Image (tube, grey):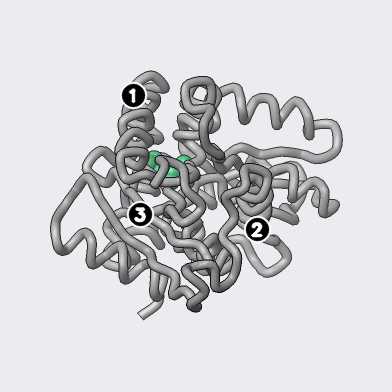
Amino acid sequence: MSLVDQQNAIGVFDSGVGGISTLRTLTRMLPHEDFIFYGDSANAPYGEKSASRVYDLTRAAVDHLREHHVKAVVIACNTATSAAKPELMKLYTDLPFLGIEPATKQAVDSGKKNILVMATPLTLSLDKFHQQEERFGSSANIYPLPCPRLAELIEKGPAGLPEIRSYLKGLLSSARKSWKQPLDAAVLGCTHYPFISDIIAEQLGSSVELFTGYEGLGRNLKRQLANHGLLRAAGSSHGASHTQSVEFMSSKNTADELALYRRLFEYGFSD
Ligand code: DGL
């Protein structure tokens, strides 16, 4: 079997559990594909590290996935995409290589005018986001909201919920003062945040639509696989119908951590 084979799995990577929220959408949108998820929970959070440290960690994680012969890599981490993807794409030209970025464009394209962008401090300090501000700032008011510590709290899973609630209440009530107009959209620019979208929605109110960009990422992944001749067709496994496999790996390689990954994949933060 060649290293890049249509039958191989798609590798999905995040600093920790966040990318599992992305994985849930990707596995639904590409039901004939197998997936390997790798979370670097031993090193999470990335969002308060330097860009060069995040680059090194991301490169090591991508190498780890490549050792498992993935046919495509999805960086399901806004922070790692912003800090590492442009450079890594130059190194890995042999397979589809995708990353997630804050879904500001999707919010603007759907006519939103007052957009909160919640993300890690590192994501909001890097060029990718500054380019978004430049590109969309004339069509909408863009309010960046760095959320230090939030990904770290979400790493604890549902056990962190009481702390997450009070953290968000404090953060949003002080941020509110800087919004010139009432918000109509919030971009969840960190893949950890969709796990707590109910709490964010509760705090922001029902008139604020939340954006993740996951469907766009899924469509792009499908397109790139097809362009490389790597899209797996229904029933392509020796003619038999194929049951999707989803494998989990973590740098925090404990039974508890892997059980948390599987639980979040199956149920999210709900009981
Ligand atoms: N889930 C990651 C993101 O999308 C980062 C969280 C972190 O490790 O700080 O930005």
Please state, as top left, top right, bottom left or bottom right, where the C terminus lies in the image: bottom left
- Give the structural element (helix, strand or loop) at label 2: helix
- Tell me the amino acid under the disc marked 2: Glu
Neighbour class for label 1 at 10 Å: few (<14), some, many (≥20)? few
At x 40%, y 75%, the residue is 267
- As drawn, the label of residue 17 is 3
Q: Are marks 2 and 1 in contact (CB under 8 Å)?
A: no
Q: Position of residue 261 (x, y in %)?
A: 30, 62
Q: Earlier in the sequence, mark 3 or mark 2?
A: 3
Disc 1 to disc 3, C-alpha distance: 19 Å
Q: Position of residue 143 (x, y in %)?
A: 66, 39
Disc 2 to disc 1, C-alpha distance: 28 Å
- As drawn, the label of residue 215 is 2
Q: Is residue 147 visible?
A: no
- Camera-near label (1 vs 3) is 1
Nearer to us in this view, 253 or 121: 253
Q: Position of residue 110 (x, y in %)?
A: 82, 54
In the image, taking residue 147 as reference, residue 188 lies left or right, namely right
Neighbour class for label 3 at 10 Å: few (<14), some, many (≥20)? many
Disc 3 to disc 2, C-alpha distance: 19 Å
At x 60%, y 22%, the residue is 127
- Give the structural element (helix, strand or loop) at label 3: loop
- Tell me the amino acid under the disc marked 1: Asp
At x 37%, y 58%, the residue is 164
Q: How many marks?
A: 3
- Give the structural element (helix, strand or loop) at label 1: helix
Neighbour class for label 2 at 10 Å: few (<14), some, many (≥20)? some
- Tell me the amino acid under the disc marked 3: Val
Question: Which quadrant of the frame does ligand 1 lie within?
Answer: top left
Q: Are marks 3 and 2 in contact (CB under 8 Å)?
A: no
Give the residue number, with chain letter if any, for mark 1. Answer: 56
